[in-house]
């Protein structure tokens, strides 16, 4: 982790995600234990007035964590949190992004706060978040 990479305003290379498929949703449901039918059952979704199932918010959070661990080793991660702001439909191709928002020294440790987003091709932001990474 070089100091030039870790400067305020720096945007890391985005992480594009493969299209969200029904198979992806079924596998994530099995792995996470979240079998909410809103993500899996078309009949339930239609009865709720929606057109189709959509991705688990935690799936997008997991993809964002993949970006974080590509940026910095997991042991340097001090905080990670997100807010779900929109659904991710089937066939969407999310893109995860991180930008250095600030660098501060806290209790003798240099910490970078990252602004995180997950967006879709049409510009919809589905997740917003922040992470704090130790630099040294």
Image (cartoon, rainbow, N blue to C red):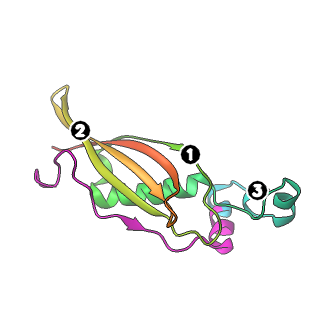
What is the spatial separation of the Cα atoms under label 2 and label 3, in whole angstroms? 38 Å
Please report the residue visible at 28 percent of the width from the left and 57 percent of the height from the top. Answer: 71
Residue under circle 3?
Answer: 38
Height in image: 115 above or below 104? below
**Which residue in the rendered view is the most extreme toward the front?**
122
The range drawn in magenta is 1-28
Q: Mark 2 packing: few (<14 Cα in 10 Å), some, or many (20+)?
A: some
What is the spatial separation of the Cα atoms under label 2 and label 1, in whole angstroms? 22 Å
Asked whether, in this view, residue 65 is left or right of residue 58, the answer is: left
- Residue closest to the eye, 126 or 130: 126
- Residue closest to the eye, 37 or 121: 121
Q: Which quarter of the rendered picture does the C terminus lie within? A: top left
Q: Position of residue 60 (x, y in %)?
A: 53, 57
Q: Specify the label residue 51 is tagged with.
A: none
The first of marks 3 and 1 along the sequence is 3
* Magenta highlight on residue 98: no
Q: Mark 3 packing: few (<14 Cα in 10 Å), some, or many (20+)?
A: some
Residue under circle 2?
Answer: 102
**Which residue in the rendered view is the most extreme toward the top?**
107
Q: Which quarter of the rendered picture does the N terminus lie within? A: bottom left
Q: Position of residue 96 (x, y in %)?
A: 42, 60
Q: Main secondary structure of the magenta part?
A: loop
Asked whether, in this view, residue 136 is left or right of residue 114, the answer is: left
Height in image: 90 above or below 2? below
* Magenta highlight on residue 25: yes
Please report the residue visible at 81 percent of the width from the left and 64 percent of the height from the top. Answer: 41
Q: Are marks 2 and 3 in contact (CB under 8 Å)?
A: no
Question: For the residue labelled by badge 3, is the local secondary structure a helix, a strand or a loop?
Answer: helix
Residue under circle 1?
Answer: 84
The first of marks 2 and 1 along the sequence is 1
């Amino acid at each position: 982790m070089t100091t030039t990479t870790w400067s305020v305003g720096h945007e890391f290379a985005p992480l594009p995600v493969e299209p969200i498929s029904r198979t992806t949703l079924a596998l994530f449901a099995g792995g996470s234990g979240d079998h909410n039918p809103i993500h899996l059952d078309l009949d339930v979704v239609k009865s709720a007035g929606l057109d189709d199932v959509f991705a688990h918010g935690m799936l997008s959070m997991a993809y964002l964590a993949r970006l974080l661990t590509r940026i910095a080793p997991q042991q340097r991660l001090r905080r990670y949190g997100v807010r779900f702001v929109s659904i991710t439909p089937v066939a969407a191709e999310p893109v995860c992004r991180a930008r250095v928002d600030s660098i501060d020294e806290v209790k003798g440790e240099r910490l970078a706060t990252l602004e995180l987003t997950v967006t879709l091709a049409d510009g919809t932001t589905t997740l917003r978040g922040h992470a704090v990474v130790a630099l040294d």
